[in-house]
Amino acid sequence: MILFAAVVRAESFTRAARQLGITKQTISERISKLEERLGVRLLERTTRRLRVTGAGATYYERCSAIAAQIDEANSEVQQRQAEPVGLLRVSAPRLYGRRYLTPVISEYLARYPQAQVELVLADRRIHVIEEGLDVAIHIGPLDDSSLVARKLGESPVHYVASPRFLSKYGTPSAQELRSARCIGFGAFETWEAQGVKSRIDPVLIVNDLELACEAAIAGVGIARVPAILCRDAVRDGQLKILFGPKPAMMRAIHVVYPSRLNLPAKVRVFVDAVAALAEPVLPLRGGSRRKRSSTP
């Protein structure tokens, strides 16, 4: 029907084929099948000219209106794709979400009034597709190769303890970590310091990094926390880094999403915004746009 309307408007099979980017033969065959299905002759064809029959003229009015509606629908969808609209479901670890996503989400919602955001903060392995998420911030090794991943940076992790704790219990060596008072995330964990692996038995088990850092400041024990969390406490003398300045580990930070195919604007714009913020804050090893602080 759309091909028929295009031929009538162009008054030529050849011109219609050129406009639509298909062959003249394809258009001719499809319109012949349309006439056969309708049982009506729509066009009179000669070697010199093309004439619309009476039935064809009536049919063209309907087809032309349908074609216009389809063009309008396509334009509307493309316009919606160009600008974020609808609900964007985002997941992130609690610490990252609290520290870094608030300004991104605030600007995103202010700039795109037709957009909405649902933010899920969780310190667990998130299954993006199964849980119906559009975007997730992932810290640590990636284990789902089906996802598209964009690296934001690397987060150093340090062993820290308060001066009060070290004054009371002494500064442990890497070999003594096994018997030290530690703050962990499980009943038994394996920590590695200076190449020495130790199975620790925590005196305090928590499920929140900020709580672990606060407990370390209070002198409860040794904690293993990200630099983004302990930086201020180290700078203010509330915590000291143990086992040398080298981080205990570097944890990669990625933003992941299901597919690049027909990527919705709401995902593309949000991912770009997160990456723009993360680059100076959590630089990749090897340099960043902003001068690094001398504290970890």
Image: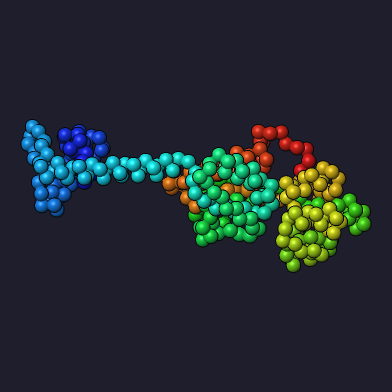
Residue at 49% in and 49% down: 86
Residue 289 pos. (x, y %) = 65, 33
Note whether 25 is above or below 188 in the view shown: above
Q: Residue at x 49, y 52 (%)?
A: 258
- From where the camera sits, is residue 218 visible? yes
Q: Quadrant of the C terminus?
A: top right
**Image side of residue 183 versus residue 126, left or right:** right
Q: Position of residue 13 (x, y in %)?
A: 16, 37
The answer to which of 246 and 276 lies nearer the viewer is 276
Instruction: Determine the residue positioned at 12% across, 39% down.
Output: 52
Q: Is residue 247 visible?
A: no
Residue 82, position as x, y percentages in the image: 45, 40
Q: How is the image coloured?
A: rainbow
Residue drawn at x 23%, y 41% is: 64
| Left or right of residue 249, residue 12 in this image | left
18 or 60, which lies in front?
60
* Image side of residue 255 versus residue 248, left or right: left
Q: Position of residue 267 (x, y in %)?
A: 51, 46
In front of the other: 22 or 118:
118
- The furthest residue to the bottom: 187
Does residue 107 lie above or below 204 as drawn? above
In the rendered view, tell whether residue 277 sits above or below residue 215.
Answer: above
Rendering quarter of residue 294: top right
